[in-house]
Amino acid sequence: MSRDSSDTFPLAFGVLVSTILAGTLVIAGLKAGITPGVSPLVILFAWGAFARRLARGGGSRFLNIAQVAGSAGMAVTAGVIFTAPLVQILHADKGLVVPPVDVVSLIIMSISGSLIGFGFVGLGTRSFLTDPTLPAPEARACETMIQAAVADQSNRPRLGRSLGLGALAGLLAPLAARLGLANEHVVLMQKQQGDRAFSLDLPMTPIYIGIGGLLTLSTALLVFGGSMLRLIGDFLLADIAPGTAAALDFPDNSMRWVGGGAMTVAVAYSLVRFLGVKRAGADEDADDSLVTVDAGRRSLQVLSIVVGIAIMLGWIIQRDGLTAFAMTISVAVLACCGLMVLLGAILSLQIGSSASPVSGTIFVTTLVLCVTAVLMGRESIDDVLLLTPLLVGACVAVCTANDASQDYKTMQLCGVRVQDGFLAQFLGLMAGSIVVPIVLYIAHEAYTLGSNELSAPQGKMFATLIDGLLLTDAPLPWWPIAWGLGIGVGAVLMEIIGSRKGIQLPSMALAVGIYLPPYLGVGILIGALFRWLAEGRRKQSNESILAAAGLITGAALLELILGSLIVGAEASSSFNFVLDDLLIFDDVAAMTRNVAGIVGIAILGGILWMNSKNAKSEE
């Protein structure tokens, strides 16, 4: 992988940042169930640290290379924390001895998944970067930040009221929730009967509101529509009495299966569209030289896939021997990786990496692996120890595509050749593959994965899925699955009809809303509405993009600070520090915290509105 000699410093800086971010955000991600897109944060770090260097020329390339390397490690963080904890959670749920985190296996499979994802997304670069139907919201936010960083002082947007104010609010809003001064979720209505619960709330979450400020209103409405379907389902499920026939047909986790069914149909349609019709819609105005990968680089991408596959095969054979199961499950994993990695890139460019439903693609992968295991007669808890690292590798591969597609799109928008970022992506991934499993081990030893202190909601979801498919004799909840498949078909038909009328109605956006927590869709709609009220149908202004990027950056910065404190404390064993200890104002009245939460939402949305409105009035 050849490179420009001027890339050495941004490469080194980016890899250092990647290592820090990947490690310190592990615990925050395990608690929240999501990981924020950190590319804007990396750009902000580089911008602040090397402002004079950027002013000497070549600043756009410097920031692009630093961004690609600096955010790559977070792909490993997401891939590992979403799937690896299911081993400890399943053992605890079944009353078995909870095993430690298998650091060596996780490092091996993280490297394998990184290489596979890195290779596939590099080979598919031209296809998804020239698709004009993919809005790439976070990539455009990063492009705007980079352009602002390298522009003449006289041509820069007013950064204080956009990026600066957004970042400050993005940091202070979740901090206020941590301290107990405001409710992060303002509950409007809730209902519970046994294990069945329904809650309608407004989220004071800068990341989701910021992402909404970057999306088109139609996409945000679809995500919100999916969230409403999820809420309606949760509301109806909460009325079902435990132990009844209806409770057997519709278990308390039914909406997860509905979302999974809808996601499966949307995934299948997106793959068909990507492999066929979608290519005819390539953006003819795109600079082909920026997205074309040289033959030599393509050979290296193929080699990366081959090496990743060899590592995965070697691990399976070492653990299970040269058996029919090892060979069959390997083929299943690799087939899923090849398809889901490309889909992961599309999803990220469609919705943004922070909100991209990685778990949806891994849901489908989990289904394939479990069905394969059942057909091969491998249905014991010991087989879970073999399947989970494979899921980790697949999830890391998909998350790599999520991150790389946004970063490569930013390079394209900034006029930097995409293949020049391959080395940066590779180095950042390798750094994350080493540090993340180690930090996960520290986290488990300190708090126990799946406990109240470290809930790992994505891990619990996959533990439930594998338990239902592989370990229990209870039938699958076919009614919720059927409803999900039907909703997915309806969403696809809606997308097809919309495309014929020139309206973008991505079925995947609706499936995202059903599959992920409802408050995500509500937060995204809040951000999109505030911006739309100011800009209407006009092209989004640079200042509103910077404000939205600031909200995401500030929230990510807070998680970085808290993650650094907890990892450092546990690694040194100097004192016990948990994030919940920050709740120092727990005596504040609930009504007061709700009012503060509503005010916080208004402030976050108001920052988007103000920057959009001011930019409009100045034209």
Image: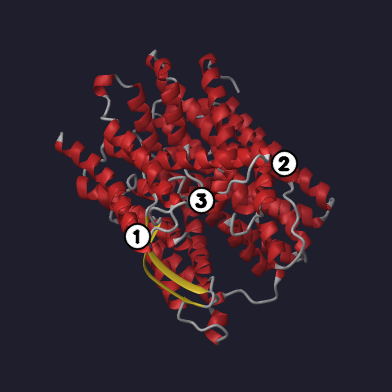
Q: Position of residue 204 (x, y in %)?
A: 37, 53
Task: Give the crowd class for mark 1: few <14, some 14-19, many >=20 residues within 10 Å.
Answer: many
Q: Are marks 2 and 3 in contact (CB under 8 Å)?
A: no
> Dot 1: what SS?
helix
- Camera-near label (2 vs 1) is 1
Residue found at x 42% / y 30%: 44
Residue topped by disc 2: 108
Q: Quadrant of residue 223?
A: bottom left
Residue topped by disc 3: 34
Q: Is residue 61 above or below residue 195?
A: above
Q: CA distance from mark 3 to mark 1?
A: 24 Å
The quadrant in which the N terminus is found is top right
Ranked by sequence position, the earlier of labels 3 and 1 is 3
- Residue 496 visible in the displayed image: no
Task: Give the crowd class for mark 3: few <14, some 14-19, many >=20 residues within 10 Å.
Answer: many
Residue topped by disc 1: 594
Judging depth in this view, the residue of 155 and 438 nearest the camera is 438
Residue found at x 45% / y 29%: 45
The label on residue 78 is none
Q: Amino acid at mark 1?
A: Asn
> Dot 3: what SS?
loop
